[in-house]
Amino acid sequence: MLELIPLTDGIGTEVRGIDVTGDISDADFDRIYRAWIDTTVLLFRDQDMTPAQHIAFTKRFGEIYTYTRSQFNHDEHPEILILSNLTRDGKPIGSAYSGRVWHSDGHYLTEPPVGSMLYAREVPPVGGDTWFANMVAAYDALPERTKERIDGLKVIISRVQSRPYNYPDRPAPTPEERAEWVDVAQPLVRVHEESGRKAIYAGGNVPWRIEGMPEEESAPLITFLQEFSVRPRFTYRHQWRPGDIVLWDNRSAMHRATYYDHVAHRRLMHRTTLAGRPSAGTGTAP
Ligand code: SIN
């Protein structure tokens, strides 16, 4: 029988009593989907799924976004992105160091992916955890004066400048990529198109700036929002076990991978990504 158990008071739900490869009734799926929107992170333990089943389960939540030109897509199922320190014939099979700063996936795209589903196949005994932050709860807790100050502002996100932070093991952008990767402006306060709730949209540690605001004002404001959002009451640290699936909502959560001993231990994770939809911002800066 389906059970929905809070992971913490501030973020996440563990979904129990479900085999994600089996038939999930529409009524049960609706409850799971609602818990995802309401609490931003879902955990399913002890799941055993093939890549095809992973893709099928992801598709119940929406359309899949496939990373283009990624050398770390699964050979037979390019919808799956491999995150791993493992090698084959001396070559990495996955991205080993991605996501170690607070971020939301694909924040540099005009329509960032709405969610990501990460499946643990092999995990180290210590470390390699993933942190999640509830950006809706963080927004709700901001002082009213700060909300008034930031509603309507836009952040300018540079994919070129984000690259070394998000993917330190990937080569620097080529001249063609630099030309193609134009900066995008996103609402600093993002209105979730399904829940209607507001979330802070300010990924961490990457050089984001606020449109039309001098650098000396923009940088401390972004830093304040990033640090505020990852206070313990808004966060959950997931310690992975093989067979865990975590689905997060990129519209209302940030996440961050942590370090582990990548020489001594193996980590193999498969990720699918849910395609973006137009976001409802709060307008342009006054
Ligand atoms: C990610 O940013 O999607 C990776 C998270 C992880 O590997 O723990």
Image (cartoon, helix red, strand yellow):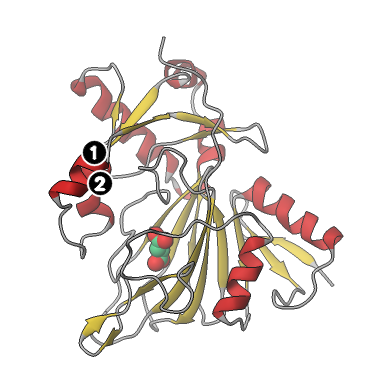
Disc 1 to disc 2, C-alpha distance: 7 Å
- Closer to the camera: disc 1 or disc 2? 2
Identify which amino acid the numbered label 2 is placed on. Answer: Ser
Which residue is at the far bottom? 89
- Give the residue displayed 75% in from the left and 62% down from the top: 4
Alpha-carbon neighbours of circle 2 within 10 Å: few (<14), some, or many (≥20)? some
Whether ligand 1 has any atom under 8 Å from the Cβ at mark 2 is answered as: no
- Give the residue displayed 25% in from the left and 42% down from the top: 180
Q: Which quarter of the rendered picture does the N terminus lie within?
A: bottom right
Alpha-carbon neighbours of circle 1 within 10 Å: few (<14), some, or many (≥20)? some
Identify which amino acid the numbered label 1 is placed on. Answer: Pro
For the question of whether residue 206 can be seen, the reply is no
Q: On the rendering, which quadrant does ligand 1 occupy?
A: bottom left
Give the residue at mark 1.
207
- Expressed as whole percent of the image width and height from the top left, the position of residue 247 reads 57, 61
- Give the residue displayed 33% in from the left and 74% down from the top: 94
121 with respect to 42 (left or right): left
Helix, strand or loop at mark 1: loop
Asked where in the image residue 61 lies, by quadrant, the reply is bottom right
Give the residue at mark 2.
162
- Expressed as whole percent of the image width and height from the top left, the position of residue 20 reads 70, 74
- Give the residue displayed 52% in from the left and 19% down from the top: 144
> Does the CB distance between marks 1 and 2 fall below 8 Å?
yes
Q: Which quarter of the rendered picture does the C terminus lie within?
A: top left
For the question of whether residue 225 can be seen, the reply is yes
- Expressed as whole percent of the image width and height from the top left, the position of residue 133 reads 48, 49
Q: Is residue 7 above or below residue 286?
A: below
Dot 1 or dot 2: first in sequence order is 2
Asked where in the image residue 278 lies, by quadrant, the reply is top right
